Image (cartoon, rainbow, N blue to C red):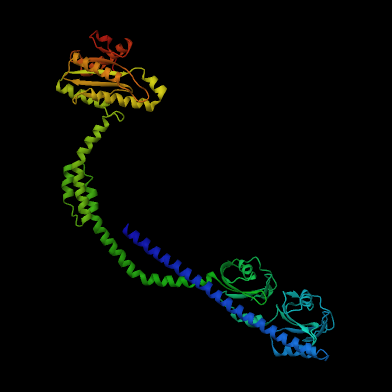
Amino acid sequence: MATLSALVMLGNAVWASYQVQRKQLIDSTLEANRVYANKLAQTTQHFVLSAQQQLASSASHIGRHLDQPSTPDEEAERLKQQTDSFNSVAVVDAAGVVKAASPAMPELQGKALTSAANKQALERRSPLVSDPFIAPTGNLVVTISHPVFDAKGVYAGYVTASIHLKEKNVLHTLLGTHFYRDGSYLYVVGRDGKLLYHPEPNRVGESAIRNEVVRAVSQGRSGALHTVNSHGVHMLAGFAPVPAVGWGVVAQRPVEATVAPLGGLMSTVLRNAAPLGILSLVLIWFFSRSISAPLWQLARNAQAKDVGEAISKVRLVNSWYFEAAQLKRAVLVSFRTFSERIGKLDVAALTDPLTQLYNRRGLERALSEFSRSGAHFGVIAFDVDHFKAVNDRYGHSVGDEVIAGLAHCMRANARPQDVLCRFGGEEFLMLLPGVDARGAVLVAERLRKAIEEHVFPEVGQVTISAGVSHFPDTEGEADLAIRQADKALYRAKDAGRNQVVLYQKRSRSDLPPAS
């Protein structure tokens, strides 16, 4: 048991260590991804604000030089050439007609745009980042626009820069270098939960709003969660919003990749701990055996059938430590009290549990002792008149109280040497050693009056009928006197109950058969 306990404790310690290390790895990865996503969100926020500032500068320049027809073309080309952040740049007038574009897009030149982004830009007349939409060129794009006002403050259109989501774009430049071979990756979602950037280009434009991380970041929240991606892979995701545009950046890593180092780490721990662990188990086995040896010897010797032999063997046990010595002393004491306990059990076997009077076994033992000693004794047999009516009217619990009360009256009217028995349900017997027939009748009559005058709870008063006999005044064996008293009891009942009848010797055929 000690060895098993040590193994269980060792296993539990290893398992607990594994769980703690696993939790630390997961928590640290979640925190790292949260911080990383927040950093990249800030970078993206800075890019958007910078792009809006560039467009604001161009819009201001265009507004001041609207009288020069070449200004829109020149400014569109300048914006496209000065940065590779945009896939295309266009200048649109107040009617939504494309006035200039870079690179040149003949299919759009001079035509009115009908996209939701164009309509929104014309209506709001304020800096705007659109939701993803399919442009007339067939590209999935996001546009950043800024209104153009002339020198008098009249709205003259807007300048817009587009990012083609399914082509190489600024998001690839900002985020694409952060893809790892262990399955970690980043993605960006719009405010509607659609993917704006993903390492798998074919997924750009898909809605991922069912993902709890996407729902959280689309609502402007930041944090970290243990989630499951669209492929059913458990991921540790950190997320942060880009407030300027309502986008969200998510950095996530597979749980499996996070906890992969644990296997090697735990193997190293076990290899290093094994020698000391084995030595500890051997020492535990040795000391456990030494400690248990006295207990085993005590247990084996206590099984000896002969009490004297058991005591001599127990005394030879080397109880070298305090607990074993105390146990040895207790075993020796238990042998000495063994006989006393048997005696008490014997008394319990001879006693009626309700009244604490002798039962039939006790009666038989008393008769055997009287027969061996040759003593003469009087016999009183009695039962309660109409006891069945008591049980039927008041219940058996009240009937039991009456029986217990009768036993109390018997003790009050008996000597210490008298044998008091409960012979049956409501039948009782008294053996009066050294008392003749006349004395037995007097005792029975005194008992009858005492019971008649006694008030029993709920029931009130009850009466008894008693029969008396004497041994050896009547011929036969001692147990014959019991039957003779029983016979006299039935005569008392036939004579009207609540009286005492002394058995008068008649022919043997009058005696009732032995029960």
Horizontal side, residue 259 vs residue 67: left or right: left
**Residue 185 in the image, given as x and y percentages of width and height:** 59, 75
Where the N terminus falls, by quadrant? bottom left
Where the C terminus falls, by quadrant? top left
Image quadrant where residue 342 sits: top left
Horizontal side, residue 455 vs residue 241: left or right: left
Question: Which residue is nearer to you in this view: 354 or 306?
Answer: 354
Q: Residue 308, relative to residue 460: is it above or below?
A: below
Horizontal side, residue 88 vs residue 8: left or right: right
Q: Determine the residue located farthest toward the right in the rendered image.
A: 110
**Residue 382 in the image, given as x and y percentages of width and height:** 29, 18
Residue 306 shows in the view: no
Image quadrant where residue 195 sits: bottom right
Q: Determine the residue located farthest toward the front in the rendered image.
A: 152
Q: Residue 435, relative to residue 201: is it above or below?
A: above
Residue under the image location 38 percent in, 28 percent down:
397
Residue 114 shows in the view: yes
Horizontal side, residue 150 vs residue 351: left or right: right
**Residue 456 in the image, given as x and y percentages of width and height:** 33, 24
